[in-house]
Amino acid sequence: MISGFLAIDKPEKISSFDVIRRLRRILKIKKMGHGGTLDPFATGILPIAIGEATKLLEFIANNDKAYEFTMKFGVATDTLDLEGSILGTNTIMPSNESLINILPQFLGKISQIPPKYSAIKINGQRAYDLARSGIDFEIKAREVEILDLQLLSYDAEKFEAKMYAKVSKGTYIRTLASDIAEKLGAICHLNYLRRVEFGKILEKDTISLDILEKMVNNGEHITKVFLHTTNILDDIPVFEVSVEELGKIRQGQFLQKSLNLPDSSIISLIHQEKIAAIAKYESGLIKPTKNIIF
């Protein structure tokens, strides 16, 4: 069975798991998963792990992500996006200058309350299921980090502002947009959301489902569009191992090495530019925790 990572350009109007369903049909492979769920109306980078690569999904969850999104002022919805029910309208459109001037207040570590229409679990139940059932509940604020925030374009006539944000894990762009609008005495919802970066994965690295299906139908090898695995784990230190060391790793043996890392550091071990294992570094020993067979 083939193993590796794909970056799918997720189309709108389908869920992230719908992408998995279609890929399983196209590739005739069952063992796969995705990283970083995108809402159905959102598009852009959706990392897909196939085969042995699924063992690495938990390690890409912390990757920073970047989005382009459009704030539609004057209309508030219960889901904070275009798919929700309208809660209110007005004619307030913040000026170009006020938008630019407010953005620095949202940079760095901020407190954010995730939307009620989200996949967060409340007492074992998804928040969106509770919200759809009309059950009242509260979601606790969480700390997230906004690494970059820019105004890309502004259209007062359409009541729209297109933005770019680079954010940490767990940040809700819908909430960020709503909070910006509230700070300006306005209301808004998102009518466009696209993930343009996922760690080191960029839009140019993606492939559409339609093109991938054509490749398979034409008998082409999909491995040629696989991502370089060492680029996937962009926040984990990488260390090369020899053939002899690789053999020991495969047998579950520890490697004795002096690394300039704190104890309990998670590292990836590579051989011939392929990830061979994930390991923990403790007391001068590299202890394999996951063997990866590519």
Image (cartoon, rainbow, N blue to C red):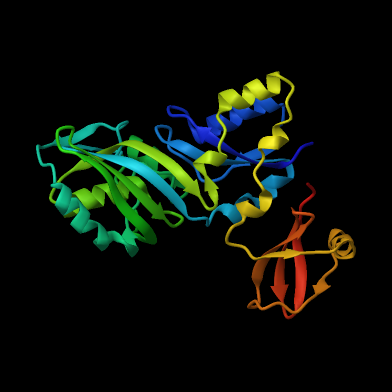
User: In the depicted view, which residue is nearer to us: 122 or 76?
Assistant: 76
Is 81 left or right of 222, judged from the image as shown?
left
> Looking at the image, can residue 12 be seen?
yes
Residue at image point 75% right, 79% down:
258
Residue 152: image location, x then y, percent: 29, 45
Is 269 left or right of 252, judged from the image as shown?
left
Single out the residue that lies furthest toward the top: 217
Residue 154: image location, x then y, percent: 22, 41
What count of labels does the image hold? 0
Residue 127: image location, x then y, percent: 39, 44
Quadrant where the N terminus lies?
Answer: top right
Is 225 left or right of 177, judged from the image as shown?
right
Quadrant of the rendered image containing residue 33? top right
Asked if 143 appears above or below 258 in the picture, the reply is above
Residue 40: image location, x then y, percent: 43, 32
> Looking at the image, can residue 133 be seen?
no
Asked if 41 appears above or below 154 in the picture, the reply is above
Single out the residue that lies furthest toward the left: 91
Is 285 left or right of 237, judged from the image as shown?
right
Asked if 277 appears above or below 37 in the picture, the reply is below
User: In the depicted view, which residue is nearer to us: 9 or 121?
Assistant: 9
Residue at image point 32% right, 57% down:
112
